[in-house]
Image (cartoon, grey):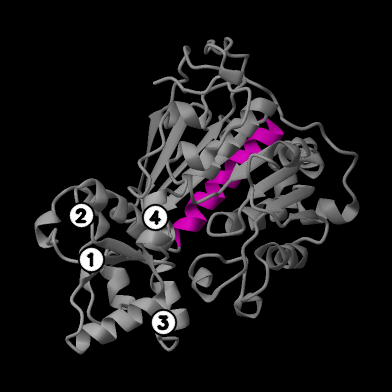
């Protein structure tokens, strides 16, 4: 299926014929110092890498999107391998729930910017690496400028809008990137390079409907999966930089941690797809631009909900509070008096009979995204007395029951 994007509204034109398979991505740096020879000696004695390959790594500039689950092992292994310059893009702070899988951070880093915590961990491992910090949220206004300063990008983003943005910015600049994703027990890794092979849009021409695919924060992730996927991403990066081996360009590696199996599928580029020439509004493309239906008219705050629940307990008000999260989330923390009906059952049309159309209903999830999607679906199905909890149960714990756990 071809990409829908065209440049400035012009008719879509087919992408050019594939160029020959590229060689090493980076030219070698000057000779290694005695310290570098000792540090990287186990690479130097591998014939396929050798001194020239290690010098290419020294000269390489790699940008890692996200210092989270995939960014953590990727940054550590890139630094250990001797990549000369590492850039980190992340605007988030470390929290306690990160430490189950984001091994570049520690307890002492909770509350710190992730990029600063990651920089310190890299320096402790390999002080020869130059680390550049980009404490920004990657978007269409800065992606091209950021990518221009690097040879290769590693995308460990956990949302579709950023993945399409990374793909398009890399394609416009002619740069390769390594992509990885994780969810629960499943991981995926591939290499995309518009000049030489398929892109992410060839694998996923259309974004899934907003709210249909839960994030790791909503659906969970097997912590050790991050190491398996992140290390394979670095393997692909080192192969691209040094020119050794066969990259995953044109192939998608799929890992099932629960079954302990890897499998592979081929990814072909669409010869009729339009060449990517400009960036766009990726939140709108992924259908996550806020709508009027999720606005203040159909929103209640945590304190308002607390008052409503108190009135309901006193027999002064009647309404249904519906938790649209998954059962595991509900077990960690829930609002007393809520009924669990997961979002998937509602959006699939399986649960409408459990929701009286003439009753007042308040939906809630973890942070408000899923409940907003359910609210929109309910209104489309003819429900009029519906609203959702602004900020989800995170806001409830913050404003009403601070003693309850968060996740």
Residue 147 position, x and y percent, is 71, 38
- Based on the displayed image, in which of its 4 quarters is residue 309 positioned? bottom left
Q: Earlier in the sequence, mark 4 or mark 1?
A: 4
Q: Residue at x 73, y 50 (%)?
A: 87
Residue 51 position, x and y percent, is 80, 40
Tell me the residue that label 4 is attached to: 294
Q: Are marks 1 and 2 in contact (CB under 8 Å)?
A: yes
Q: From mark 2 to mark 4, how far is it between C-alphas?
A: 14 Å
Q: Earlier in the sequence, mark 4 or mark 3?
A: 4
Q: From mark 1 to mark 2, how far is it between C-alphas?
A: 9 Å
Q: Give the residues in magenta.
A: 224-243
Relative to residue 113, is residue 47 depicted above or below?
above
Q: Earlier in the sequence, mark 1 or mark 3?
A: 1
Relative to residue 29, is residue 320 depicted above or below?
below
Tell me the residue that label 3 is attached to: 405
The quadrant of the picture occupied by the N terminus is top left
């Amino acid at each position: 299926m071809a990409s829908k994007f065209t440049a400035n509204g012009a008719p879509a034109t087919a992408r050019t014929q594939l160029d020959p398979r590229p060689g090493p991505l980076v030219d070698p740096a000057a000779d290694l110092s005695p310290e570098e020879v000792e540090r990287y000696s186990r690479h130097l004695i591998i014939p396929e890498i050798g001194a020239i390959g290690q010098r290419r790594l020294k000269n390489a500039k790699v940008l890692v999107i996200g210092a989270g689950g995939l960014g953590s092992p990727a940054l550590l292994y890139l630094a250990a391998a001797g990549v000369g310059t590492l850039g980190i893009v992340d605007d988030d702070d470390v929290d306690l729930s990160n430490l189950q899988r984001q091994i570049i951070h520690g307890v002492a880093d909770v509350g710190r910017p992730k990029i600063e915590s990651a920089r310190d961990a890299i320096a402790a491992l390999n002080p020869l690496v130059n680390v550049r910090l980009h404490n920004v949220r990657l978007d269409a206004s800065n992606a091209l400028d950021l990518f221009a300063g690097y040879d290769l990008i590693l995308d460990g983003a956990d949302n579709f809008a950023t993945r399409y943005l990374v793909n398009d910015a890399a394609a416009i600049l002619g740069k390769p990137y390594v992509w990885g994703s994780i969810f629960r027990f499943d991981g995926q890794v591939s290499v995309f390079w518009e000049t030489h092979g398929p892109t992410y849009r060839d694998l996923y021409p259309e974004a899934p409907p907003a709210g249909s695919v839960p994030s790791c924060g909503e659906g969970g992730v097997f912590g050790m999966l991050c190491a398996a996927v992140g290390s394979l991403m670095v393997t692909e990066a080192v192969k691209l930089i040094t020119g050794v081996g066969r990259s995953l360009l044109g192939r998608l590696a799929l890992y099932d941690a629960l079954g302990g199996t890897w499998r592979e599928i081929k990814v072909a580029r669409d010869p009729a797809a339009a060449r990517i020439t400009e960036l766009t509004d990726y939140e709108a493309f992924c259908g996550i631009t806020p709508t009027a239906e999720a606005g203040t008219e159909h929103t209640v705050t945590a304190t308002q909900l607390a008052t409503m629940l108190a009135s309901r307990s006193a027999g002064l008000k009647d309404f249904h509070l519906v938790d649209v999260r998954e059962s595991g989330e509900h077990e960690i923390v829930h609002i007393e008096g809520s009924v669990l009906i997961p979002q998937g059952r509602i959006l699939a049309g399986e649960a409408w009979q459990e929701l009286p159309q003439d009753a007042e209903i308040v939906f809630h999830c973890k942070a408000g995204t899923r409940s907003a999607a359910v609210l929109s679906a309910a209104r489309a199905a003819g429900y009029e007395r519906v609203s959702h909890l602004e900020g989800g149960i995170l806001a409830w714990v913050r404003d009403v029951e601070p003693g309850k756990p968060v996740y």
